[in-house]
Image (spheres, grey):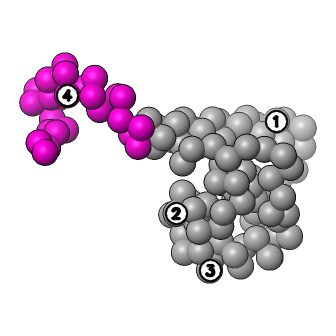
Amino acid sequence: MSTISWRPQDLTSTQAANLLRDEAFESRLSFLRDVAIELLNAVESLRSTTTANGNHKLELYEEVRKFEIDLIRAALVRTGSNQSRAARLLGVKHTTLNAKIKRYGISLETSGSEEIAA
């Protein structure tokens, strides 16, 4: 099995096409795309909060808590409520994720959502 170089000048068009067809690569790319969308939504939410509140302070811990809850929920939906896989997607230990799920009272119901390949 050959290895694929990540330097653009060493990557042939055939290797690039094979890489793009690689399901694992596509899954990681899809996850990164989802995270980017979540981040953009969070930024937009912060903008609207700032506009709506005028001169009122933003509560950093409350905003971080909301963002963290949204990320955890997205990871749980994506993995069909599999906490171990969700923890891997989020880059945390499963015990940390479990503690946060309990602390925030996050439901493990996927509300009929299908598991998304992760």
**Closer mark to the observer between disc 1 and disc 3:** 3
Measuring 48% from the left and 40% from the top, which residue is drawn there?
Answer: 27
Provide residue 83's location: percent of width, then percent of height: 65, 67
Q: At label 1, which amino acid type do we have? A: Ser
Measuring 11% from the left and 26% from the top, which residue is drawn there?
Answer: 9
- Write down the region rendered in magenta: 1-25
Secondary element under disc 1, as helix, strand or loop, is: helix
Q: At label 4, which amino acid type do we have? A: Gln
Number of numbered discs visible in the structure rendering:
4
Residue picked out by circle 4: 15
**Closer mark to the observer between disc 4 and disc 1:** 4
The question of residue 10 being in magenta is answered with: yes
Disc 3, disc 4: CB below 8 Å? no
Q: Main secondary structure of the magenta part?
A: helix
In primary-sequence order, the first of circles 2 and 1 is 1
Disc 2, disc 1: CB below 8 Å? no
In primary-sequence order, the first of circles 4 and 1 is 4
| Gap between marks 4 and 1 measured at Cα | 44 Å
| Gap between marks 2 and 3 measured at Cα | 11 Å
